[in-house]
Every structure is written in structure tokens, then in C-alpha cells.
């Protein structure tokens, strides 16, 4: 027990070291973690591990998906919904079919059910990898929004395919019409459960006397409750978490206090940071066990299979994204679309940004070891090995070259949006002007009688920021605090209204939300509330 605990501590230190190395080299940390995990398995710093497959999806998927949904802009998601849905469902289905056909053609004894199982595992791109890579290059915001939205939805579609293929492998039965009907039912049930659970949590957060610590604990239980209930009712646990996360995140300013938002963001960032690191490194540590379990399959042949399937995935995704662009141009003649002529540059970047990552790892590791008592799951270790190859190839090849491709294409922002700095100035001016108007209309008398409120008005005009100063008397201090908190709530309403404008970047709005939360915390600490 003590040895296992020491190994866990050592593993965390190794993960942090690799992430720091990635930051120094300005390389997306999933790339370094993946390579680091592979090296760890060869130098035997840590023992090879064998992970309980039943726990992988349950432990890792709900919090990682919930955190991704929480920070996804619903405004951007809705604007690019058609493209996101086409990428998340149609392209995932096409690439799953492509992987199934290719794997059956090149791997002796590989059945179509196993092919679809492998396709469901490796078809969803990883948003963490893509957005981490894109941090170091300038890319239109719409592309990042599409990649983030796609990653939320394609996780659901790919894992549904994975589930049906798993049933087909274990039972030997697959009826297309029955599977198609079940596919729709799984989606609908997942969405319904996610919304229902989210509403319950919304009510608890808003109308029960929760503290900051309680709010944080509740946010951590929410994704697990959504996932488990949906799975128990034969719905998509992934879709439940994504739907519930989007619902609650879009209303967080209504039911979470500023302290809960500040503290919760830090806690969630830390937990998901380490979960991502653990998943990427664990597959490398399990690699020796996987290789030993390849059985009759030669390691050279296994590597060849992985390279061929990786190439098929890369080419297939690019062709699909370019095809989507052509279809969008055609359909724009009949319906309104967010972009009438997508061209080829944006689709090429999105296509090349299809690195695989956490979802594929978790899904592959969740394959049961046994089909039934004493009967091993067919080709499990080969599927795990190919999955690792696909992740390694796409992360290293596409991850390292994506910045070069973006710079080479020199793609302009087709939204013609203002630079983020100018958007911040614009939002700040709006907050300033409307805040002063709010004070003039709602608290004109207090400005005359209370020098602290009057000074607040002057500081807004002079500094463009709300700052607090102590009043001379207890009454004035109380009045000052009350007006300040009212003004902060009014400013949040202004931000909520400004966020409806597609021209204003959601990240800019989020930044000002965080500034207001910090300002409120400063006020409450000063007045000991």
C-alpha cells in the first residue's frame, strides 16, 4: 500500500515535470505526456500497470467532459451548430466505417464488429490537444469554437458506436434497424437525463443555503450523477454530462456566488489538469502489458496496422471536412448558414487538427478483459496497441506540424472581428457608461449625501474601474456596500446582454465576469461580509 502511494506521488511529479518541459519547449503538453509515458514504459522507472477497465470511463470521462462543457461558449456553439453537428455525427460515423473497412481488410481474423469497435474508439478528435496546440498560433476564433463544440458532441457519438459494437462483439448479434432506433433513443434519453439532473442541481444551488465549499462539492458530484443515471436508463452518459454542463454553465451567474465561481474555477482547473496528465501517462505505463498480450500478432505487424489506420483517419477526416465545406457552399443557396463560402483553408486546419487523445484512451482501456468467464475479449491488446499508435502518430505528426500549417495558410478571420484588445476596450466603455447611468438613475440622492458613493461615481469616470473606499460612518459604509453590490449585479446583467452579440468574443466577456467576481470579493473582505 505504501509502495503504491509512493509510486503515485512519483508519477505526479513526473507528469508535472513533463508539463513544465512542454511549456519551456512551447509544445502542447499532451504530445510530451504521450511520448513521456512511452519512455517511462521502456526505462522501467515505474512498474507496468494494469488498469481496471470498468472504472476508466466512470472515473475520467464525467469530470473531463463536464469541465469542457462548462467552459464552452453556448453562443458560439449555437452559431456553428450545423457544422459542429455534421462533424460530430456524420464525420464520426464516416471515419468509424472507414476504420472498420480498413482494419478488416488488413488485419487477419478481424471481424466487422471489432472494426467498428476500433472505429468508435479512434474516431473522436481531442479538443484538449487541439486547443493546446492552437494556443501558440493565431487562428480565427470560429475554428477554435468549432473544434471545442465538435469535441463535446463527437465524444457522445463515438462512444455510442463503441457501445453498440461492444455488444455486437460480446453477443455476436447486430440488427441494423434495431441499432438505429436504439441510437436515437440513447441520444434522446441522454439529453433528457442531463437536463433533468441539471435542473435539480440548479434548484439546490439557487434556493438552498449552500456555502462555497458545498457549491464546489456539488459541482463535482453533478457530472457523475448525470452520467450514472443516464447509463442506468440506457441513455448516453456522455450526452447527459455535456447537456447538463452546458445548461448549468450558461446560468452560473444566477446560482453561484462570486466566491464559488472563483474557488471552483481553481479547483476544477487543478483536478482536470491532473486527470488529463494521468490518462496520457498511464497508457504508456500499460504498454508493456499490452505488447505481451499481442499473442500471435507480430509487433512489427501491429505497428504497421497502427500506421495504416492512422493514415486512413487523417486522410479521411480531411476529405470529410473539405466535403462539408463544399456542401455548405451548396446548401447556402437554400438556407441561411453562418458562413456561405467556407473555402478550403479553414476546413483544412480543422481536418489537420484531428489529434486523438483522452477519450480514445479511456474508451480503449474500458474494453473488458473477458467476454465471459474464462473467455478473453478477442484482439483486446491489439486494439489497445493500435489506439496508442493512432494517438502517438496524430499527436506528434499533426500536433507538431499544425502551427506550421496555420502560419503557412495565413488565414484571415472571416468574422472580421475586432482584436481582443479592442473588444475589451469596447466592453469596458459599455460597462462604464451604463454603470454611471445606473448610479445617476437609481442613487442620485445618495451621491449627494454619501461621499463614498460620490467618490465611486468619480472613480468610474476617471479610472474605468470600480474601486472601493471606506466611508466615514457605519451608515455610509453600509450604503456604499449596498450600492456597490447592486452595481456589480447590474454590470453582470450588462455583460450577459453584451454576450448575446456574436461580434463580442465569449472569452472577453468571461474575463470581465471574473474581474467583477474578484472586485466583489475585495468588497466583501473589506467590509467583512
Image (spheres, grey):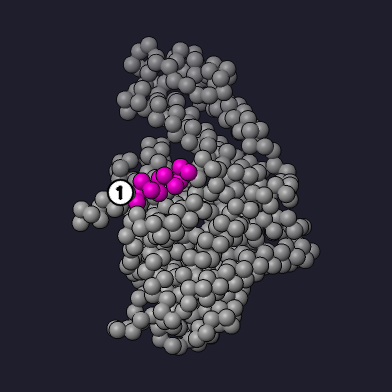
Say which quarter of the image contains residue 304.
bottom right
Observer-nearest residue: 416 or 445? 416
- In the picture, measured across the screen, residue 256 lies left or right of residue 408, that is left
Picture layout, residue 454 above or below residue 310: above
> In the rendered view of the protein, which quadrant contains the N terminus?
bottom left
Coordinates of residue 258 in the picture (x, y in percent): 41, 37
Q: What span is colored magenta in the figure?
A: 11-21
Number of numbered callouts drawn: 1
Q: Is residue 270 highlighted in magenta? A: no
Coordinates of residue 398 in the picture (x, y in percent): 61, 57
Q: Which residue is rendered at x = 55% and y = 43% of the image?
A: 26
Coordinates of residue 209 in the picture (x, y in percent): 29, 43
Q: Main secondary structure of the magenta part?
A: helix
Observer-nearest residue: 275 or 447? 275
Say which quarter of the image contains residue 399.
bottom right
Observer-nearest residue: 475 or 93? 93
Q: Which residue is rendered at x = 48% and y = 29% of the image?
A: 487
In this view, the residue farthest toward the left is: 1
Res. 72 in view: yes
Say which quarter of the image contains residue 39.
bottom left
Query: Element under label 1?
Result: helix
Coordinates of residue 255 in the picture (x, y in percent): 40, 45
Give the residue pinned by disc 1: 9
Picture layout, residue 146 above or below residue 331: above
Q: Which residue is rendered at x = 53% and y = 81% of the image?
A: 107
Amino acid at each position: 500500500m505504501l509502495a503504491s502511494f509512493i509510486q503515485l506521488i512519483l508519477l505526479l511529479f513526473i507528469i508535472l515535470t513533463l508539463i513544465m518541459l512542454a511549456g519551456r519547449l512551447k509544445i502542447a503538453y499532451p504530445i510530451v505526456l504521450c511520448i513521456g509515458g512511452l519512455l517511462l514504459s521502456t526505462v522501467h522507472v515505474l512498474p507496468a500497470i494494469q488498469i481496471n477497465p470498468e472504472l476508466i470511463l466512470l472515473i475520467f470521462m464525467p469530470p473531463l467532459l463536464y469541465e469542457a462543457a462548462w467552459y464552452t461558449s453556448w453562443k458560439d456553439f449555437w452559431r456553428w451548430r450545423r457544422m459542429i453537428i455534421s462533424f460530430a455525427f456524420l464525420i464520426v460515423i464516416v471515419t468509424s466505417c472507414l476504420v472498420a473497412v480498413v482494419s478488416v481488410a488488413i488485419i487477419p481474423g478481424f471481424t466487422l464488429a471489432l472494426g467498428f469497435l476500433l472505429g468508435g474508439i479512434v474516431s473522436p478528435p481531442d479538443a484538449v490537444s487541439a486547443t493546446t496546440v492552437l494556443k501558440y498560433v493565431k487562428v480565427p476564433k470560429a475554428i477554435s469554437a468549432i473544434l471545442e463544440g465538435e469535441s463535446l458532441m463527437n465524444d457522445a457519438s463515438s462512444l455510442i458506436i463503441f457501445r453498440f459494437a461492444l455488444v455486437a462483439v460480446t453477443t455476436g448479434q447486430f440488427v441494423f434497424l434495431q441499432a438505429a432506433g436504439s441510437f436515437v433513443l440513447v441520444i434522446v434519453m441522454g439529453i433528457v437525463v442531463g437536463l433533468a439532473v441539471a435542473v435539480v442541481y440548479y434548484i439546490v444551488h439557487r434556493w438552498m443555503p449552500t456555502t462555497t465549499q458545498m457549491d464546489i462539492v456539488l459541482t463535482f458530484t453533478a457530472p457523475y450523477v448525470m452520467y450514472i443515471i443516464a447509463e442506468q436508463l440506457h441513455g448516453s452518459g456522455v450526452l447527459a454530462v455535456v447537456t447538463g454542463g452546458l445548461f448549468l454553465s450558461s446560468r452560473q451567474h444566477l446560482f453561484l456566488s462570486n466566491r464559488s465561481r472563483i474557488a471552483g474555477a481553481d479547483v476544477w482547473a487543478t483536478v482536470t489538469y491532473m486527470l488529463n496528465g494521468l490518462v496520457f501517462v498511464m497508457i504508456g505505463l500499460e504498454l508493456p502489458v499490452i505488447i505481451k498480450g499481442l499473442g500471435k500478432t507480430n509487433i512489427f505487424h501491429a505497428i504497421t496496422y497502427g500506421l495504416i489506420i492512422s493514415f486512413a483517419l487523417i486522410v479521411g477526416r480531411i476529405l470529410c471536412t473539405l466535403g462539408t465545406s463544399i456542401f455548405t457552399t451548396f446548401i447556402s443557396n437554400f438556407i441561411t448558414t453562418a458562413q456561405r463560402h467556407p473555402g478550403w483553408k479553414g476546413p483544412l486546419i480543422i481536418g489537420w487538427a484531428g489529434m486523438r487523445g483522452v477519450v480514445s484512451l479511456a474508451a480503449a482501456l474500458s474494453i473488458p478483459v473477458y467476454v465471459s468467464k474464462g473467455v478473453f475479449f478477442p484482439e483486446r491488446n491489439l486494439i489497445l496497441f493500435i489506439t496508442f499508435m493512432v494517438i502517438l502518430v496524430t499527436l506528434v505528426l499533426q500536433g507538431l506540424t499544425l502551427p506550421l500549417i496555420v502560419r503557412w495558410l495565413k488565414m484571415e478571420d472571416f468574422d472580421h472581428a475586432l482584436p481582443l484588445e479592442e473588444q475589451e476596450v469596447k466592453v469596458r466603455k459599455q460597462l462604464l457608461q451604463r454603470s454611471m447611468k445606473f448610479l445617476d438613475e437609481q442613487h442620485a440622492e445618495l451621491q449627494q449625501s454619501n461621499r463614498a458613493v460620490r467618490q465611486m461615481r468619480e472613480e468610474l469616470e476617471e479610472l474605468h474601474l470600480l474601486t472601493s473606499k471606506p466611508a466615514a460612518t457605519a451608515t455610509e459604509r453600509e450604503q456604499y456596500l449596498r450600492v456597490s453590490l447592486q452595481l456589480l449585479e447590474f454590470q453582470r446583467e450588462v455583460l450577459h446582454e453584451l454576450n448575446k452579440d456574436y461580434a463580442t468574443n465569449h472569452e472577453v466577456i468571461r474575463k470581465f465576469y471574473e474581474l467583477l467576481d474578484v472586485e466583489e470579493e475585495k468588497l466583501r473582505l473589506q467590509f467583512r461580509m
